[in-house]
Image: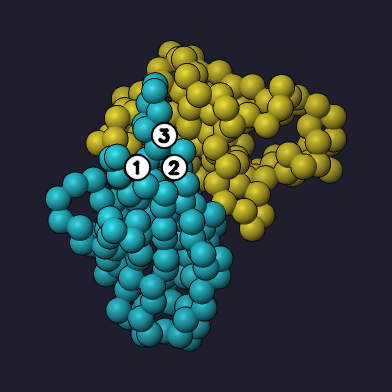
Chain colours: A yellow, B cyan
Amino acid sequence: GAGVSQSPSNKVTEKGKDVELRCDPISGHTALYWYRQSLGQGLEFLIYFQGNSAPDKSGLPSDRFSAERTGGSVSTLTIQRTQQEDSAVYLCASSLGAGAWDLEQYFGPGTRLTVT
Amino acid sequence: AQSVTQLDSQVPVFEEAPVELRCNYSSSVSVYLFWYVQYPNQGLQLLLKYLSGSTLVESINGFEAEFNKSQTSFHLRKPSVHISDTAEYFCAVIQETTSYDKVIFGPGTSLSVIP
């Protein structure tokens, strides 16, 4: 597609359930990022992929959060045993590369996660 | 470590008035700066960026930002705002790490244009 897509757009889940959020980056973009945006908060970095590897997982809030990327393309963010504090908009972005001159990030529309 | 400060969390301004959204960053050897905008119910998109060269950069919709090294600032300005400029604005800076160049976002400034 022409832009970054994310699915689902909205997800309501019960506390304790697992959820999977999907991101399709722009074709050819080697770098992929996950962020979390809570109500009234800025962007919280979660994880960065270069190709299929994740050199920076420093933003993952707990071991309930994990992410993977396959084929240098699609990425899945998994949250296990969801808690109410996980409620937020989860944003995915991709960029052509990871050097400063390739670092314009293209963002998807986000997945709004609500944990009840 | 790099950090980005946006002192104003909310900025209300009347239509056709000028506006300045402030951004300050911690110093670094190399500085690359960005402004992203998030319109209501839309994803973030790049507004403008400074990588090198002229310290004054402009966007296609009338915004401009000036890199000021001595004041470690990258304030965003527009001489006359429109209702359609209502959005959340994020300043970002690159943090050079050992493995890659990481983009650090500020907390955002919510611009509300009042008719």
Measured from the top left, where is residue A63 in percent x and y? 71, 22
Query: Badge 2 local density, few (<14 within 10 Å), some, or many (20+)?
Result: some
Q: What residue sits right under mark 1 in the picture?
A: B28
Foreground: A67 or B41? Answer: A67
Q: Position of residue B27 (x, y in %)?
A: 37, 47
User: Which amino acid is tagged 2?
Assistant: Gln
The answer to the question of whether label 1 and label 2 lie on touching residues, with beta carbons closer than 8 A, is yes
Same subunit, labels 1 and 3: the answer reads yes
Instruction: Count neighbours of disc 1 (C-alpha within 10 A) and say few if under 14, some if 14 to 19, many if 20 or more.
Output: some
**Label 1 chain ID:** B
> Which residue lies at the image location 44% right of the left edge and 29% below the top edge?
A32
Mark 2 chain: B
Mark 2 vs mark 3: give the one in front: 2
Callout 3 secondary element: strand
Quarter occupied by residue A9: top right
Q: Earlier in the sequence, mark 1 or mark 3?
A: 1
Q: Is mark 1 on a helix, strand or loop?
A: loop
Q: Which label was assigned to residue B2?
A: 2
Q: Which mark is residue B102?
A: 3
What is the C-alpha distance between the residues marked 1 and 2?
7 Å
Nearest the viewer among B109 and A88 is B109
Q: What residue type is labelled 1?
A: Ser
Looking at the rendered structure, the number of numbered marks drawn on it comes to 3
Q: Are the residues at dot 2 and dot 3 in contact (C-beta closer than 8 Å)?
A: no
Q: Pinpoint residue A36: horizontal percent, then vertical percent.
A: 60, 41
What residue do we see at 63% from left, 29% from top? A60
